[in-house]
Amino acid sequence: MTHANFLPIEFTAGFIALAALLLYPIAMHISNGKHRKWPFHRYIFWSAGIILAALTLTGPLAQLAHTDFTAHMAGHLLLGMLAPLILVFGKPMTLLMRTLNVPAARNLSRLLNSRYVSFVTNPIIAATLNIGGLFLIYMTDLFTLMHTSAWLYGLVHLHVFLAGYLFTISIIYIDITTHRYSFMYRAIVLVLALGFHKVLSKLIYAAPPTGISKDAGESGALLMYYGGDIIDLGLIVILCWQWYQAHAPKNAKDSRTGVI
């Protein structure tokens, strides 16, 4: 397989990650001057998510992923699943809203309430963009093509990250959420998404992408199958906990907060 020069992608990813790590505490400082102090642990979540995402596009793992399918799949799990799950606990949209001035915050609020945002944050649409994109990558020639074009490689990985983040925020409501859907609906979509993710891993196991050996394909598929299960378990636990809290008897809620 012929590989393109990916140094520009690695440099860009590293620059964006560094900017994200620096801008967040600046936003915290601005927010603290206007509102109640922003919890520092959210910056820890934000930093961890950004670093995990950056590791898939720059550094040793990114280099190895070009020639090792298992390393590539590890990057897929980090970029499209684990990093988005951790990042939502940084509540970046809430922090941004607190940081902006009133006119800018109103414009952002209008955007978040727009029909477009309502459409893409619908769990079934977000799941289709996320899982459907993975099917396109591994069940077509896109996997081979993206390793011959740096810009296509970057574009595909950008989609994996954004689609993963979009799917995560459509299932669990941690950050600002303007369009809410029932727990039952989100649970059904989550189960379906998990099922299709497993189907895809089995298809890769049976028929790896072009240029990937059978042994490498099987190893990568197994990591996708079981590694995805571990991360998905986090989504399931969080959704179930939120569901329980939303429907717990009032007395039970009061007892947990020390109120009788």
Image (tube, rainbow, N blue to C red):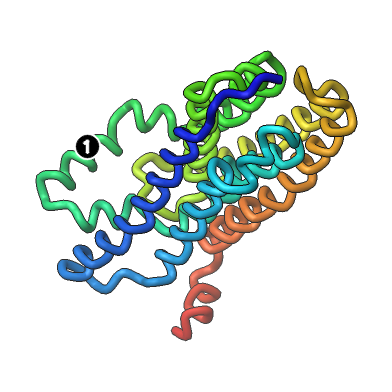
- How far across and down, in percent of the image, does residue 91 sit? 39, 56
The local crowd at label 1, few if under 14, some if 14 to 19, many if 20 or more residues have their Cα within 10 Å, is few
Residue 207 is situated, as x and y percent measured from the top left of the image, at: 84, 21
Q: Does the image show residue 124?
A: no
> Is residue 94 rendered to the left or right of residue 55?
left
In the image, taking residue 117 as reference, residue 11 lies left or right, namely right
Q: Residue at x 23, y 67 (%)?
A: 29
Residue 237 appears in which quarter of the rendering?
bottom right
The picture quadrant where one finds residue 107 is top left
Let me know if residue 87 appears in the view. yes
Element carrying mark 1: helix
The image position of residue 146, as x and y in percent, is 59, 21
Between 103 and 56, the residue placed more toward the observer is 56
Residue 130 in the image: above or below residue 105? above
**In the image, residue 5 above or below residue 189:** above
Where does the N terminus fall, quadrant-wise? top right
Q: Amino acid at mark 1?
A: Arg
Residue at the image position 48 percent from the left and 38 percent from the top = 166
Residue nearest the observer in this picture, 189 or 43? 43
The residue that label 1 is drawn on is 110
Q: Quadrant of residue 5?
A: top right
Query: Above or below — where is 65 with respect to 259?
Result: above
